[in-house]
Image (tube, rainbow, N blue to C red):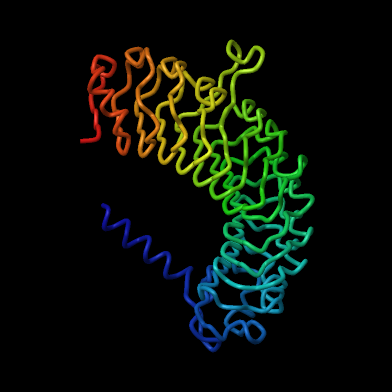
Amino acid sequence: MHDLMHDLATSVAKSECTFIKSKSQIVDGSVRHFSIIDSDFNRQKASGVLDNRSKTVRSLIFLKEYEYIGVSFIDTCISKFKHLRLLYLNNTLFEVLPKSIGTLIHLRYLDLSGNCLLKKLPESICKLQKLETFRLFSCSGLKKLPRNIGRMISLRHMEITTKERYLRENGIGCLRSLKILTLSGCENLLRLFEGMQGLTSLQRLHLEFCSLTSLPYSIKYLKRLEKVMIDNCSELDLKMEFQGEDKDNLCLGVRKFIINNLPSLVDLPQLILQGSANTLQCIMMKNCPKLKELPEWLQNLTSLQTLEILNCQSLSCLPEGMQRLTVLRQLKIQGCPALSESCRRDEWKIAHVREVHLDQ
């Protein structure tokens, strides 16, 4: 059955998808999804290959990586293919995204990632109210996000690289449908917007190579947040203790918490971790040299199944009450010689753990 389904899928794909290798190429009228690999394709007006497909083209993918394309080519494509659902310009170089992008009202997926020449986005892009995926990953020259980005109400997945120092309060925080948010390579970004409570659907938050010094306390309102990944944020300190009635009333749903290469980290975020005590299943910590001790409240994370601690050399012992973590099934400690020795000495703390991997 598997081979039969594979053959069927291949057959269907051949009839609807094609690679454009030449401007004179003859294409069957049933094709709706085009991948362009002809390096000369963008130097003139769109060829006859596509001219007669203006109402049927649904996907346009430019596959020549790091190829410079002129704004006239993009503008021509936009003007001809009003029914596009997907526009893929990943690792393609251009300086200006034309204002006409706002006319692609059916667009669901827009990938502009890897363009170091792009410095500004037109405000008209905020008219794409059906857009679900917007990738601006590694657009290292982008000075700022559009002012009205909060109007892109259907966005579910967004990846951003920007030179901004601060994100607007009424911008990304208004995207109530957003499920996945990645901020990467934002080297000037000092803080996130405080009003995170507007991200009512957010499930995954990924921060990497940013200059953030802290996270906003409004993260406690993200009741659907399941996964937090923080990587290579050299200035970030995650000390976030309970405030007021948080201890009794806070109920988050984070399941996986992963941090790596945080040289300024001294404390783990109580607000996020103990606030998710009933759901948190996995904690992974790597390369946090200033983390000297694990908090006593770690014993309250009674749903924890996996705990990995790698290259956190300043840690010397596990906290009291580890035996309360009755569902802990895997404990991995590497690059932490003092901590590993302590675990051997106080073996009773982790005797209930099924899989234990310690430094040799």
The residue drawn where x is 57% and y is 51% is 184
Q: Is residue 221 left or right of residue 314?
A: right
Looking at the image, is 248 positioned above or below residue 335? above
> Farthest residue toward the left?
360
> Farthest residue toward the bottom?
24
Q: Position of residue 213 (x, y in %)?
A: 62, 39
The residue drawn where x is 71% and y is 52% is 164
Residues 153 and 323: in front is 323
Residues 276 and 177: in front is 276
The residue drawn where x is 71% and y is 65% is 119
Looking at the image, is 99 positioned above or below residue 168? below
Residues 339 and 356: in front is 339
Q: Position of residue 142 (x, y in %)?
A: 68, 61
Total number of numbered discs in the rendering: 0
Looking at the image, is 120 positioned above or below residue 206? below
Q: Position of residue 208 (x, y in %)?
A: 53, 47
The residue drawn where x is 62% and y is 61% is 140
Answer with the quarter of the image where residue 85 lies.
Answer: bottom right
Q: Position of residue 132 (x, y in %)?
A: 62, 50
Answer with the quarter of the image where residue 316 lies.
Answer: top left
Quarter holding the C terminus?
A: top left
